[in-house]
C-alpha cells in the first residue's frame, strides 16, 4: 500500500465581485445582516454571457495545479471532478477536462456530494493511489451557483451565501507511509436529504418539461432550499465528530493540528469549531469573507490560498473537514 500526497494546488475565481451592498439592490437584505450571520463581505459571481462555466473554471484551476506540480499533463492517470452545478445534466464535467487538457483517454469520475464533494473526491483519489491502481490523479472542485439562485426577496436566506469558483489538486504516489494523506473519513445521513436540496429538475420528481408546462410563477422547486438553522445545528456537531474521528484514527491530539481548513459554509460555524477545539487564529484558515460558500470548491480554494500565503509547510498536520447537503460530511488528515 502506498500513500498519496498533494504536489500541486490551483484556484480560479471569476473577476466579477458582488458585494453585500450590491445584493441589497436586488433583494431585501443588507450588509450588516449578511456579515453578522455569515461573515461574508463579498463573493464572485460569473457574469451572464461570460465564458466561465463550472467546467471552464475547473479547467483553469487544474492548469495552475498541474503547472505547480511540475508534471507533464500526460502523467495524469485519472480525473475526479466534484460539483453540484455541472454544465450539463449529463455527462458530468470530468470528461470535459480530459478533452480540454488534450490528454490520453484516462478515466474521469464525477462526484455529487455538494459541500463535502472535494473531501469525497480526495478520498476516491487517495484510495486509487493507495492500492497502486493509479499513480497521479487530478482532483477538481468547481461550482457555478449564481445562475441558479433566486435573487428575489423570496430567496434571500440562501442566495446571499453562495459564490462561484474552482480549486484543484494534483495527487501522486508517496512511498513513505507517514507522509501525505494519512486517512479520510466519509459519512452520510440521507434522512435529511430534503433539508438542503434542489428538488427539480429530477427524473423522479418533476422534469423540465413539467416545469415549463405548469409555468407556475410560485414554483421554487428549481432553486436551492435550505432549512438554515437545522443545517447549522447538524453542521457543528458533525464537523466536531469527524475531525475527532480523524485525529483518533491517527493517534493525534488537537495540539498537533497545524492547520484546519473547514468547508467555508458560515464563518460562525468555523468560529464555533475553533473555539470548541481551542485552536488559535493561526491554526484555522477562513476566506468565506471574500468568496461566500462555493460548496465543492471551497476547500480547494482555501487550501490553495493557505498554501500560497505560506501557512502550510512541509511536515505540518493539515485537517480538512466538510459538512453539507445529503447530509454528507467528511474529513481528511494530511501530513504535508
Ligand atoms: O454549506 C452547506 C452547509 N450550510 C450551512 O452549514 C449553512 C447553515 N446555516 C446558516 O449558515 C444560517 O442558518 C443562515 C446564514 C443560512 C441563516 O442565518 P440564521 O441566523 O439561521 O437566520 P434565520 O434563517 O433564522 O433568519 C433570521 C431572520 C428571519 O427573519 P424573522 O423571521 O426573524 O423576521 C429571516 O427572514 O433573518 C431574515 N433573513 C434575512 N434578513 C436579511 C433571512 N435571510 C436574510 C437576508 N437578509 N439575506
Image: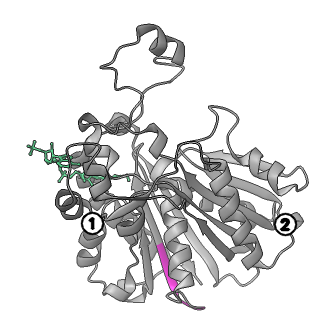
Label 2 belongs to which residue? 73
User: From what the image shows, is residue 324 above or below residue 335?
Assistant: above
Q: Residues within 10 Å of mark 2 (few under 14, many from 20)?
A: some
Q: Position of residue 200 (x, y in %)?
A: 45, 25
Find numbered disc 2 in the image and state the secondary structure of the residue it sits on: helix
Marks 1 and 2, the one that precedes in the sequence: 1
Tags 1 and 2 touching, CB below 8 Å: no
User: From what the image shows, is residue 166 above or below residue 149?
Assistant: below
Label 1 belongs to which residue? 39
Q: Position of residue 147 (x, y in %)?
A: 48, 40
Q: Position of residue 253 (x, y in %)?
A: 39, 84
Decide whether residue 316 is among the magenta residues: yes
* Residue range highlighted in magenta: 314-319
Mark 2: is the Cβ under 8 angstroms from ligand 1?
no
Residue at x 25% of width, y 44% of height: 157
Find numbered disc 1 in the image and state the secondary structure of the residue it sits on: loop
User: From what the image shows, is residue 211 above or below residue 79?
Assistant: above
> For this view, does 327 lie left or right of residue 56?
left
Residue at x 39% of width, y 43% of height: 189
Amino acid at each position: 500500500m502506498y500513500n498519496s500526497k498533494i504536489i500541486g494546488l490551483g484556484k480560479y475565481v471569476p473577476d466579477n465581485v458582488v458585494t453585500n451592498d450590491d445584493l441589497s439592490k436586488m433583494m431585501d437584505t443588507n450588509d450588516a445582516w449578511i456579515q453578522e450571520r455569515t461573515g461574508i463581505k463579498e463573493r464572485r459571481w460569473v457574469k451572464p454571457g461570460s465564458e466561465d462555466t463550472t467546467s471552464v473554471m475547473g479547467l483553469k484551476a487544474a492548469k495552475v495545479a498541474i503547472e505547480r506540480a511540475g508534471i507533464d499533463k500526460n502523467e495524469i492517470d485519472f480525473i475526479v471532478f466534484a460539483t453540484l452545478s455541472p454544465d450539463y445534466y449529463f455527462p458530468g464535467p470530468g470528461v470535459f477536462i480530459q478533452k480540454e487538457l488534450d490528454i490520453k483517454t484516462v478515466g474521469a469520475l464525477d462526484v455529487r456530494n455538494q459541500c463535502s464533494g472535494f473531501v469525497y473526491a480526495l478520498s476516491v483519489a487517495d484510495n486509487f493511489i493507495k492500492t497502486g491502481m493509479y499513480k497521479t490523479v487530478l482532483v477538481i472542485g468547481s461550482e457555478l451557483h449564481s445562475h441558479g439562485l433566486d435573487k428575489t426577496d423570496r430567496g434571500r436566506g440562501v442566495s446571499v451565501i453562495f459564490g462561484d469558483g474552482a480549486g484543484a489538486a494534483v495527487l501522486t504516489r508517496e512511498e513513505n507511509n507517514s507522509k501525505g494523506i494519512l486517512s479520510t473519513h466519509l459519512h452520510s445521513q440521507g434522512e435529511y436529504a430534503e433539508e438542503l436540496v434542489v428538488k427539480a429538475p429530477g427524473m423522479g420528481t418533476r422534469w423540465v418539461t413539467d416545469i415549463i408546462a405548469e409555468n407556475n410563477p410560485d414554483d421554487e422547486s428549481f432553486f436551492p432550499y435550505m432549512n438554515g438553522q437545522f443545517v447549522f445545528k447538524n453542521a457543528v456537531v458533525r464537523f466536531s465528530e469527524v475531525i475527532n474521528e480523524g485525529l483518533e484514527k491517527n493517534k493525534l491530539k488537537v495540539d498537533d493540528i497545524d492547520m484546519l481548513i473547514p468547508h467555508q459554509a458560515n464563518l460562525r460555524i468555523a468560529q464555533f469549531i475553533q473555539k470548541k477545539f481551542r485552536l488559535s487564529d493561526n491554526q484555522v484558515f477562513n476566506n468565506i469573507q471574500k468568496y461566500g460558500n462555493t460548496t465543492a470548491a471551497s476547500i480547494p480554494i482555501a487550501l490553495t490560498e493557505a498554501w500560497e500565503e505560506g501557512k502550510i509547510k512541509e511536515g505540518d498536520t493539515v485537517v480538512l473537514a466538510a459538512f453539507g447537503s445529503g447530509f454528507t460530511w467528511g474529513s481528511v488528515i494530511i501530513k504535508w
